[in-house]
Image (cartoon, helix red, strand yellow):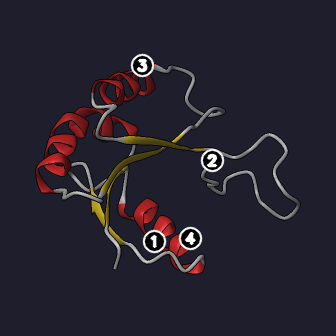
């Protein structure tokens, strides 16, 4: 194992998807998901707990590890962007420690990829 990605996500499913993608590409890395409290997932709990999750990841990571925040873009179903702005602001404050990752469906998605499927970009 080459290192750990402390992956701050909306819910466990997001971490499972990233783990499966990296395994399919033979990337030898440990994924340690950090989830918002409550376990229900969603953007609101992530935005609420992000600062605490970020501090936890920073305290636990070692040299060579990575801290990433992954959330959905929800461009078509979330008209207000307040929570996205809050998450971006927090990530910007920790820009030396964290890599923000936005999961969205590309405008010109490949054939066979349904609109609701997450595609990391």
What is the C-alpha distance between the residues marked 4 and 2?
13 Å
Numbered disc in front, either 4 or 3 = 4
Q: Position of residue 19 (x, y in %)?
A: 45, 71
Q: Earlier in the sequence, mark 4 or mark 2?
A: 4
Say which label, 3 or 2, has the lower sequence index.
3
Please, what secondary structure does the residue beneath circle 4 have?
A: helix
Q: Residue at label 3?
A: 82
Q: Which residue is mark 2?
A: 121
Spatial distance from mark 4 to mark 3, Cα to Cα? 30 Å
Residue under the point 24% across and 48% down: 36
Determine whether label 3 and label 1 are within 8 Å by CB.
no
Left or right: 12 as drawn, with respect to 48: right
Per the image, label 1 sits on a secondary structure element best described as: helix
Q: CA distance from mark 3 to mark 1?
A: 29 Å
Q: Which residue is mark 1?
A: 19
Say which residue label 4 marks: 21
Assess disc 2: are there few (<14), some (14-19) or many (≥20) residues with their C-alpha within 10 Å of its C-alpha: few
Asked whether disc 1 touches disc 4, contact meaning CB atoms under 8 Å apart, the reply is yes
Q: Check disc 2 and report its element: helix, strand or loop.
A: loop
């Amino acid at each position: 194992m080459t290192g750990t990605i402390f992956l701050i996500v909306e819910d466990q499913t997001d971490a499972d998807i990233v783990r499966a993608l990296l395994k399919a590409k033979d990337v030898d890395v440990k994924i340690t998901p950090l989830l918002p409290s409550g376990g229900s997932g969603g953007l609101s709990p992530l935005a609420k707990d992000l600062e605490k999750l970020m501090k936890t990841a920073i305290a636990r990571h070692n040299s060579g590890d990575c801290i990433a925040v992954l959330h959905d873009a929800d461009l078509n179903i979330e008209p207000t962007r307040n929570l996205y702005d809050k998450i971006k602001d927090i990530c910007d404050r920790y820009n030396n420690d964290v890599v923000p990752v936005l999961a969205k469906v590309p405008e010109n998605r490949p054939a066979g990829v349904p609109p609701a499927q997450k595609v990391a970009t």
